[in-house]
Amino acid sequence: MAVAGAVVKVYGSAVSPFVATVLVCLEEAGAAYELVPVDMAARENTAPHHLARNPFGKIPAFEDGELMLFESRAISRHVLRKHYKNGGGGDLLREGDPEGAAMVDVWLEVEAHQYEPAVAEIVRHCVILPMIGAGAARDQLVVDASAGKLRAVLAAYEARLREHEYLAGGDGDDAGVSLADLAHFGFTHYLMATEYAALVEERPAVAAWWRRIAARPVAALMSWPPPPS
Amino acid sequence: MAVAGAVVKVYGSAVSPFVATVLVCLEEAGAAYELVPVDMAARENTAPHHLARNPFGKIPAFEDGELMLFESRAISRHVLRKHYKNGGGGDLLREGDPEGAAMVDVWLEVEAHQYEPAVAEIVRHCVILPMIGAGAARDQLVVDASAGKLRAVLAAYEARLREHEYLAGGDGDDAGVSLADLAHFGFTHYLMATEYAALVEERPAVAAWWRRIAARPVAALMSWPPPPS
């Protein structure tokens, strides 16, 4: 829940899929936070006060008392680890179970190195650039190449999700959602507003998995603007 | 140490920087392992028996009894977590210390999303393609663009490493090397065999950090072929 005077601060714009991942984790953990805008259009992210938060000039950056963090997946791990220890949110990292933790790690890396590279250019050309008013026409060759990659990645997801309700799998108490699933939220939320939503919808297990992610309370609480329809 | 009949198996070729990262972690943990070659030239990585290990057809894949893993950084976490718990190797993930673990996570993400994208094309064009006999001439425009990115990334590293001996920083017992540093081994080992080694050498704190990484026992034990000089 975003509140004034909260302990932790997220620096960035909720419109960024990377910031969205962090917000999703904070909401999932039931944590209080303050979202502090960074004016990307004015290149505030390259100003000294932001570089002091993240020397690579990216969003989000994150402040938890004395601890300054950046990189969305690292912030997400911290948020979930801290709050689960204190009774907030579920066991979304499975750090108490070496095999469970390893499977969360594997599928979080898959999200970072297989899924995101395939989906990012579709979202950039079909949603983000039009949303921020960048005038360039959509580069359909780039979008087509990404759609081809995404189709191959989702074929592997379909096989996985036919066997497991969530990507990291597991049995019994570990069978549920994990950070590996939540990390898909930002980009997939936008993808589903484009005609390439069909790539998800045409695969029954992937489509059902996405409906489960999108139905979590976190999604309804997201304050970012809806993408153009 | 690579031994016959070892419990865990690494599938891949040591020449891959991603496989190298896993081997570095196994050596650091003092773990026994078997390296099982995957013939990339014959596209064995796309054969059904390899896709059963990694549905995305990449190397390395990893087998630890019933547990099958892939994605080099996830395998590395598993190896270090398991062996540290059993008294092998150092505390390279700092999972017992929430702040320490968060800083390891941050700089491991930096390696994945800032350093690797900057260095990978230099290594591919200047080392890997010539090494595997791919005939295409080096694309100097691509290499120049990557060198520009790498220069900017290393400027941030220099500032960080002027203040801390290793990337994840920390105090006291947590001041040492972590997975965030070791994950740089594969690509940097090759980079240092090119004229772009100067980008490291011209920054005193980065150069000293790299000498500390390269001097660890793991480096001497690496069985991959030396890059062309």
Image: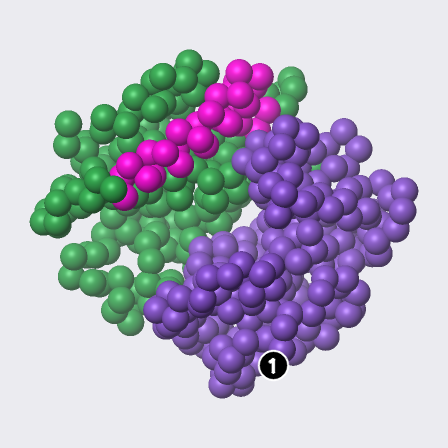
Chain colours: A green, B purple
**Is A63 positioned to the left or the right of B98 in the image?**
left
Residue that lies at the very extreme toward the front in this rendered image:
B135
Q: Amino acid at mark 1?
A: Ala
- Quadrant showing the C terminus of chain B: bottom right
**Residue B122, above or below A154:** below
**Is B24 positioned to the left or the right of B130 in the image?**
right
The image quadrant that residue A143 belongs to is: top left
Residue beneath the point at 40% across and 36% down = A149
Residue beneath the point at 58% across and 75% down = B192
Callout 1 crowding tier (Cα within 10 Å): few <14, some 14–19, many ≥20: some
Percent coordinates x, y for residue B157 in the rendering: 48, 72
- Quadrant showing the N terminus of chain B: bottom right
**Residue A78, above or below A226:** below
Q: What stretch of residues is rendered in magenta?
A: A142-169
Chain of the residue under label 1? B
- Whether residue A173 is visible to the viewer of this picture, yes or no, is yes
**Residue B223, above or below B151:** above
Q: What residue sits right under mark 1 in the picture?
A: B208
Residue beneath the point at 27% across and 44% down = A142
Residues B81 and B27: in front is B27
- Whether residue A6 is visible to the viewer of this picture, yes or no, is no
Q: Secondary structure at mark 1?
A: helix
